[in-house]
Image: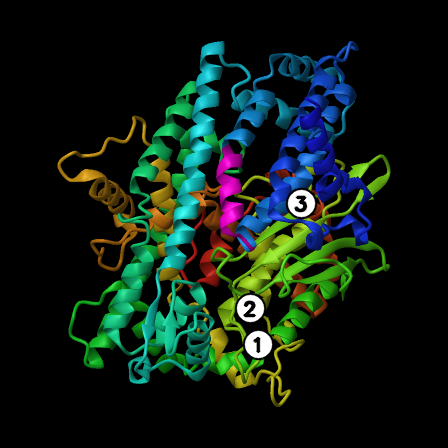
């Protein structure tokens, strides 16, 4: 016992997390320079110990349960765990390593058990239920009532009302699911990093521009190789699939990318079966027929039927146009000597060429006007024009990688609002895609406002030896998207961390991000930053006109592609009995056939054997979007409708940066977090519920009323 105590003392003395309240860093930011892999497990164990002690203090309180001593006390518990997890899980996505991944695997069942021990604590739930049953007699404001309802429903939806036997089943199922989803995600990352193709003959790279070839050469140099190295990161796959003349290489890259984790060392097909069956078993414990039914109860959509209603409306509106777009590309390819059947690895190539011919514009035309520093100026400047924000780099704030930049964010009166971290370029330790997280959330302690620490992590084009980082048009749009999430996190003003920032229904969370994307199509915004990196010339009107004319190019194809992912997600999560593998064809074929069938109603290109989206669909199998991928289209409907309010205001004020409309959007959407019902917040901003019309109009599809 004495030995164990001395080890703990040494750990506490040398582990930065044990003294997180005493950090001398600016705004209490993480001292990344002092944090090492060996600190995490002891810190997590101590944090869980403290968290359980805080729960015991609530359950053993001899006073009658009240909102203050039970609901608010519960909401504030687990602070150290939030601090440790905020650091660890951001790094496992943005700067992982073998040691962090090993810790993640070991930690997963422990955190699952910790969570279950709280969620299934009968004494705690009885105190919560006592307060909940008296809610109509309590003088609570909207945020407090919402917090009470959310906490009660969270417990009920996580097993608090289950029988002792079912509670044990719940513990076992959640622990199993936690390990499965983690393994799935790690397999995707490992499979992504494992595949490369070295090109040593430059003639095989015909069609690629010098920037892309420079990036591929840099990829090879990092590995100590001579030549040009292809990998499965989006910065490689997108330009290669669009521009490379060599069809065989495009096909091989496509097969590797969309064939990830189908068989082999990192096979995810069996894991998918286990995940969906475990989720169904969890739903059945709560007398729900499907996992989607259980998952959707706190969303804007509320039911699987409402999700399918949206998907089907969009399918009916967009499919005829999408099929026509494919025919147009097929005819173009044939007219240019391509007589084979158009395959998925041909689509981006010929689609881009047709776009260039129709609109005479390409990423290469626009890249020189989207240099990284200029883009940052534009994106930050948008926040200044709409909301009065100021961003000031602070090199005293420690970062988790040398490429990360940290900023202090201030409001129009010079008051500190947030810390913002920006991480732009791909690395081996970073998963693909782009996202926003909070390192630390916003909340109030009495009258003191604890402001948030927000991070945007992205995978954008790197600078080369002779050029700065020049973004594609889509990369600028993605930055605006993720920065919209960041604004949601930075501008929040809530009493409780559980409600602050992006803690909103998942089909509402994409509204601020997708809304922010709309500004890239506005000349008034582009004129503030889009300058040629060599000459300083503004983006010419001719290019702007071409860009705007091309905006609806293949909008229908893009929509049905997103719908296919939504149908795939819903198919896996609306099964009413456990998925059974067909023994004749095996697991891989069974999983792929089921997925192909789910997507076929919106498939406009051939289905290729050996490929399937589901085996690397991290959003639904290792992220938080199970039965929720539809939310991107749901939010797109919202963002188009919301931006139409700004367009109407522009007609009166003469500027897209209309301050009054921005103030209304900020106060009713960005600041409120999850303090009220999402639709109520939207209606307060909009003056009514959204319709599909603005989205169809933006995409050039004939408008029809939502039924």
In the foreground, 374 or 361 = 374
- What is the spatial separation of the Cα atoms under label 3 and label 1, in whole angstroms? 29 Å
Q: Secondary structure at mark 2?
A: helix
Label 2 or label 3, whichever comes before in sequence order:
2
Q: Which residue is mark 1?
A: 370
Q: Which residue is mark 3?
A: 501
In the foreground, 635 or 607 = 607
Q: Secondary structure at mark 3?
A: loop
Q: How are the residues colored?
A: rainbow
- What is the spatial separation of the Cα atoms under label 2 and label 3, in whole angstroms? 23 Å
Q: Residues within 10 Å of mark 1 (few under 14, many from 20)?
A: many
Can residue 131 be seen here? The reply is yes
- Proximity of marks 1 and 2: CB atoms separated by less than 8 Å: yes
Dividing the picture into quadrants, the one containing residue 458 is bottom right
Q: Which residues are magenta?
A: 95-108
Label 3 or label 1, whichever comes before in sequence order:
1
Please, is residue 501 above or below residue 515 in the view? above
| Image quarter (top left, top right, bottom left or bottom right) of the N terminus | top right
Can residue 503 be seen here? The reply is no
* Residue 321, percent from left and from top: 32, 61
Q: Residue at x 69, y 53 (%)?
A: 32
Q: Is residue 700 magenta?
A: no
Q: Which residue is mark 2?
A: 476
Please, is residue 416 above or below residue 213 in the view? above
* Residue 108, percent from left and from top: 51, 35
Q: Is residue 305 left or right of residue 679?
A: left
């Amino acid at each position: 016992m004495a030995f164990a105590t001395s080890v703990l003392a040494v750990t506490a003395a040398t582990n930065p997390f044990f003294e997180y309240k005493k950090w001398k860093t600016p705004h209490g930011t993480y001292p990344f320079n002092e944090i090492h892999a060996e600190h995490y497990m002891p810190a997590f164990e101590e944090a869980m110990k403290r968290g359980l002690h805080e729960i015991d203090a609530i359950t053993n309180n001899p006073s009658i349960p009240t909102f203050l001593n039970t609901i608010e006390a519960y909401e504030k518990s687990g602070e150290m765990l939030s601090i440790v997890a905020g650091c660890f899980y951001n790094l496992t996505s943005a700067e992982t390593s073998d040691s962090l991944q090993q810790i993640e695997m070991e930690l997963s069942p422990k955190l699952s058990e910790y969570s279950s021990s709280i969620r299934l604590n009968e004494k705690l739930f009885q105190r919560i239920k006592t307060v909940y049953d008296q809610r109509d007699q309590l003088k609570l404001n909207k945020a407090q009532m919402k917090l009470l309802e959310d906490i009660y429903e969270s417990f009920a939806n996580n097993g608090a009302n289950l029988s002792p036997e079912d509670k044990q089943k719940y513990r076992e199922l959640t622990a199993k699911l936690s390990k499965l989803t983690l393994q799935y995600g790690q397999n995707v990352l490992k499979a992504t990093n494992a595949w490369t193709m070295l090109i040593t003959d430059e003639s095989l790279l015909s069609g690629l521009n010098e920037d892309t070839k420079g990036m591929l050469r840099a990829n090879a140099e990092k590995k100590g190789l001579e030549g040009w190295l292809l990998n499965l990161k989006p910065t490689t796959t997108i330009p290669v699939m669009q521009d490379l003349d060599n069809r065989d290489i495009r096909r091989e890259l496509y097969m590797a990318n969309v064939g990830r984790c189908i068989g082999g060392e990192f096979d995810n097909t069996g894991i998918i079966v286990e995940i969906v069956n475990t989720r169904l078993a969890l739903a059945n414990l709560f007398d729900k027929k499907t996992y989607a039914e259980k998952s959707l109860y706190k969303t804007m959509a509320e039911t699987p039927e409402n999700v399918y209603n949206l998907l089907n409306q969009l399918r009916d509106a967009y499919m005829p146009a999408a099929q026509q777009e494919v025919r147009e590309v097929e005819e173009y390819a044939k007219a240019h000597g391509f007589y084979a059947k158009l395959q998925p690895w041909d689509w981006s190539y010929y689609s881009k060429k047709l776009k260039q011919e129709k609109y005479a514009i390409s990423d290469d035309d626009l890249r020189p006007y989207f240099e990284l520093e200029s883009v940052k100026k534009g994106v930050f400047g948008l926040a200044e024009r709409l909301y009065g924000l100021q961003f000031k780099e602070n090199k005293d704030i420690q970062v988790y990688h040398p490429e990360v930049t940290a900023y202090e964010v201030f409001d129009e009166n010079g008051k500190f609002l947030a810390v913002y971290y920006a991480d732009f370029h791909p690395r081996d330790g970073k998963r693909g895609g782009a996202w926003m997280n909070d390192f630390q959330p916003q909340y109030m302690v009495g009258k003191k406002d604890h402001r948030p620490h927000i991070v945007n992590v992205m995978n954008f084009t790197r600078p080369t030896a002779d050029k700065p980082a020049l973004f594609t048009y889509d990369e600028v749009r993605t930055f605006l998207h993720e920065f919209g999430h960041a604004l949601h996190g930075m501008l929040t003003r809530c009493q409780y961390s559980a409600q602050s920032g992006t803690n909103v229904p998942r089909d509402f969370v994409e509204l601020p991000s997708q809304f922010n994307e709309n500004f890239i199509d506005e000349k008034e915004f582009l004129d503030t930053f889009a300058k040629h990196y060599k000459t300083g010339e503004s983006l010419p009107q001719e290019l702007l006109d071409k860009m705007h004319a091309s905006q609806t190019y293949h909008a229908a194809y893009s929509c049905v592609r997103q719908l296919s992912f939504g149908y795939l997600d819903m198919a896996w999560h609306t099964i009413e009995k456990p998925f059974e593998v067909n023994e004749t064809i095996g697991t891989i074929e069974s999983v792929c056939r089921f997925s192909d069938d789910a997507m076929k109603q919106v498939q406009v290109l051939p289905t290729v054997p050996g490929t399937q989206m589901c085996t690397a669909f991290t959003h639904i199998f290792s992220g938080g979007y199970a039965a929720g991928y539809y939310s991107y289209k749901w939010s797109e409907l919202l963002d188009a409708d919301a931006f139409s309010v700004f367009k109407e205001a522009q007609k009166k004020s003469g500027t897209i940066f209309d301050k009054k409309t921005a103030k209304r959007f900020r106060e009713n959407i960005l600041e409120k977090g999850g303090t009220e019902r999402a639709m109520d917040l939207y209606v307060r901003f909009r003056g009514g519920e959204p319709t599909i019309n603005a989205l169809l109009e933006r995409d050039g599809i004939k408008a029809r009323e939502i039924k």
